[in-house]
Structure formats: structure tokens, C-alpha cells
Amino acid sequence: MRITIIGAGYVGLVAAVCLAKLGHIVTAVDREHVVQDLQDNHLSIWESNLFDMLVISRSEGKLLFATDLIQASAGADALMIAVGTPTREDGQSDLSQVEHVAAQLFAAGSCPPLVIMKSTVPVGTCDKLEQSLQAAGIRTEVAFNPEFLRQGSAVKDFMHPDRIVFGCHSRQAEAKLRQLYHGIDAPIQVCDRRSAELIKYASNAFLAMKISFANMISDVCEGYEADIRQVMEGVGADRRIGPHFLQAGLGYGGSCFSKDLQSLLTSGKAIGRSLPLLEATAQINEERIPQMMDKLIALWGNPRGKRLGVLGISFKPQTNDVRDAPFLTLVQLCHLYGIDVQAYDPVVQHLSMKGVTQVDSAFEVSAGADAVIILTEWPQFIELNWVLMVQLMNQRILLDGRNILSDAMIARLITQEDVVYIPVGRPVVHSEEHDLEQAR
Ligand SMILES: NC(=O)c1ccc[n+]([C@@H]2O[C@H](COP(=O)([O-])OP(=O)(O)OC[C@H]3O[C@@H](n4cnc5c(N)ncnc54)[C@H](O)[C@@H]3O)[C@@H](O)[C@H]2O)c1
């Protein structure tokens, strides 16, 4: 098939590269500077396998880039929309990027016979888009095909999804969508567009809720000296619950969970329904970083002028995405308290933020630090020489915001290096001789 994709960001580019791999001829359309970078094989997205697949698809002539939507979509079998849908200040989804695409189609008076909405949009958006295109005399059908990829394993998730959802109302649209995904072995659910739109929001809300649930229980663990890792191992072993997204830590980030939760809350309000489960999910998440900082400040006493070393900037491992990352909240708080931040991330580079010094290694983070916090669970942080890390510190306070250090390593650091170790959902540990008051 010939597919045009508007929006070559995270979702659009991954879809473009994967659909080209499946044998389709794909043209990805984006703004001038984005296209220029892509044509120079310069990817702003750090995602496993993406670069190699992009280079191969381009060399085979299956993947093209363009800036003119109308030219690029002339003669295409389908137009896929993968532009951003951020949150407005009032909590509603900002659909201006989708509306801009629609305006271009209205102005041209033409469009491929199938429009596939990949962007996450509020319930009813696809109905409205189709009605307005048809009212303008443009014969096309709009289908909703949500994307469930996880950043950090986006290509794998696209090629091996748990399920594929088609929200469409004609057999022709369904047949085209099946042809598009031919070669991917996954269950396909065909449903109406509104239900498909809601499947995407409900899925993200549920995942965010699981994370906040684990974090809420981690608070109880701290109060009763239980171990959240063991609690969630026991909980997740129940097949009705499952082990995923039950790791307590410093909360979720990224471009989707918060925004989709917010959008669903706003959709609820619009029909007079409050969605308290989602409100609590968001609130629990917002409390994570401030709670951890409270523990640190209780040890420090006066935080002003202290230096905090931060390991991990991206919102999760295996990506360079910092959108809505817990790091941003942490930096804001540090700024308020007058704390200097020294940060390192294996892939996030050239982040320019007031009060943040970015360094080139984990050891530079700990050198002279009054505490080090593990913010992102990059696997290489587990393997660090932690004895050397703490020896370089000014004050040996280690906050393990993702519970990644092994019990053996923690025991060694406590007994031999006199470290105060602050995990999540487990008791704070320190050597018997260590007087926590001394840390002040
Ligand atoms: N990032 C994820 O993990 C993820 C997962 C599932 C679904 N989604 C959803 O997919 C959609 C896209 O998300 P993303 O993370 O890829 O966003 P993004 O910001 O990375 O990419 C959007 C791209 O669209 C381009 N764009 C916007 N308007 C344009 C226009 N008029 N002409 C040309 N290009 C235009 C932008 O330049 C940008 O490159 C959102 O609705 C998001 O909620 C994202």
C-alpha cells in the first residue's frame, strides 16, 4: 500500500519505519527542520533499532520524507495522522495540530480514501472529523487505530503488539487496515470508533493507576517496615493482577500518562462525571518527588547550598525523552530550596536548565555531592562501582528512587562505607554507629 503519515515524531516515525519494513511505500510528512534532520539521517529520538531500520528502508526506496501534505498524500491509499495532542491549561486535549491537518485537507478539497487517526484523541473526535470532511465534499472514512507502543521498546512493540485495535464502521476500511498490518502476528479487535478512542485512554489510565497503586502501598510499607518489592511480588503473582507496572518508585512521567489521564478527567467532567480513581492516581504520582525530597531535607536540615547528584534524566530507561520526566519536578523543587543539581544521563545530552550542571559520567555526579539520587533505572546504574561512587561523595546519602541496588550491595555500603540508604517502600538503612543527626 502507499501510506502517507503526517507527523514524524515518536509515533509517526516508528510507524513509518515499521510499515516500510512490512513492505508498504511510506511518505512521512513533517515540518521543514524535522524533515531536514531525517533526510540527513539525524534522529532526535533515541530508540533501539530505529536508526538502522530507517537507513535500510530509505535505501530500498520504501521510506520517503516530505513537507507538503497535499502533494505527499496524492494517490496514497491512506493518510495516517500522528501529530501531537498535548494538554491545554484547562485540562482539555489541545487538538490544534489535528485541526491544522484537517484545514489543509479542506483547503485542498481532497484526501486519500481512508484517514487513520493514530494520535490519541478524545471520544468523538474521529466522528467529528469524518462529518466535517464529508460536509466539505471530501469522500473519505476516518478510522481510529490507537498506538500502544512504549518508548524505549517502540519498534519491538509496534512489530509485536499485544493487540491491534481498529475503530471503524465499514468493511472496506477494516480490509484496508488488515492489509496495512499484514505480517504482524497479533489479535485484532474491530470495534466502533468511540470505543476504540476510549480503549486508548482507559489503557493508559489503568497502567498509571497500577503504578500509583504500588506507590500508595509503598507508603504503607514504609510506615510498617514492610518491603514493597516483596509485597508486589506476591500481589503480581496473581494472574488476575499480573506483575507489570507494580514497581514502586518516583512515579510515572513521559508524554502520555499525565496528559491522557487529564484528558479523560476532562471528558468525564463534560458529562457530569467525576472520576475519583483517576484523580487519586494523578495526586499520588505528584506526591512522589516531594515526599522523597522531604526525607532528604529531614537529614540535611538546611538544604540551601547543598549539592544533589542525580542519576538519570529521561523519564524512563532506553529513551532520551524528558517530556514530563520526574527530573523536571525534582529540578523545580531543588531550585526552590537553593540546592545545586549535578546530573548525568547515558543518552540525554545538552539539556539547558537553570541550576543544573550536566556532567559526563556517574562518578562526576557523586564527586563532592551531599546526596545522590537514582531517578531513572538505567541498567548501567546497577552495575556501577558503588563503593567508589560513595567514596567520592561529600555526604554519603544515597536515595534509591527506583529500588535498583541489590541487598548484597546495600549491606556492603552500609557496613563498610557508612552510607545512609533511602529506598522507596522499605525502611531507611544505615550502620548502627551512624548517627542520623550527624548528617546535618
Ligand atoms: N509517544 C508515545 O509514546 C505515544 C504512544 C502512543 C500514542 N501517542 C500519541 O501519538 C500522538 C503523537 O505523539 P508523539 O509522541 O509522536 O508526538 P511528537 O510531538 O513526538 O510528534 C508529533 C510530530 O508531528 C509534527 N507535526 C505537528 N503538526 C504538524 C503539521 N501540521 N505538519 C507537519 N508536521 C506536524 C511535529 O513536528 C512532530 O514531529 C499523540 O497524540 C500521542 O498522545 C504517543
Image (tube, rainbow, N blue to C red):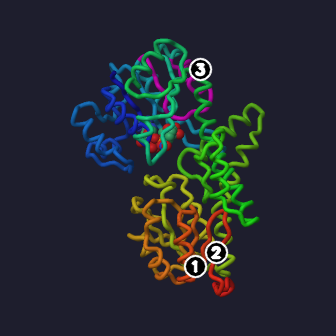
Q: Hey, what amino acid is under mark 1?
A: Ile
The residue at 59%/75% (across/down) is 338
- Mark seen at residue 192: 3
Q: Which residues are magenta?
A: 113-133
Q: Hey, what amino acid is under mark 3?
A: Asp
Residue 199 appears in the figure:
yes
Q: Nearer the viewer, residue 279 or 373?
A: 373
Q: Give how far across and how far down residue 84 sits, in percent.
A: 49, 40
- Front of the two marks 2 and 3: 2
**Disc 2 secondary structure class:** loop
56 with respect to 138 (left or right): left
Give the CA distance from mark 3 to mark 1: 57 Å
Q: Quick check: marks 1 and 2 in contact, CB under 8 Å?
A: yes
Give the CA distance from mark 1 to mark 2: 7 Å
Give the CA distance from mark 2 to mark 3: 53 Å
Indicate whether 132 appears above or below 219: above
Judge: label 3 CB < 8 Å from ligand 1. no
Indicate whether 173 appears above or below 13: above
**Disc 1 secondary structure class:** helix
Which of the two discs, 1 and 2, labels the residue nearer the N terminus? 1
The residue at 69%/85% (across/down) is 437
Estimate how packed mark 3 is, as few (under 14), some (14 to 19) or many (20 or more) residues with alpha carbons within 10 Å. some
Which of the two discs, 2 and 3, labels the residue nearer the N terminus? 3
Residue reaching furthest to the left: 59
Residue 383 is covered by the magenta coloring: no
229 with respect to 391 (left or right): right
Q: Give how far across and how far down residue 203 sits, in percent.
A: 60, 37
The residue at 64%/57% (across/down) is 230
- Mark seen at residue 414: 1
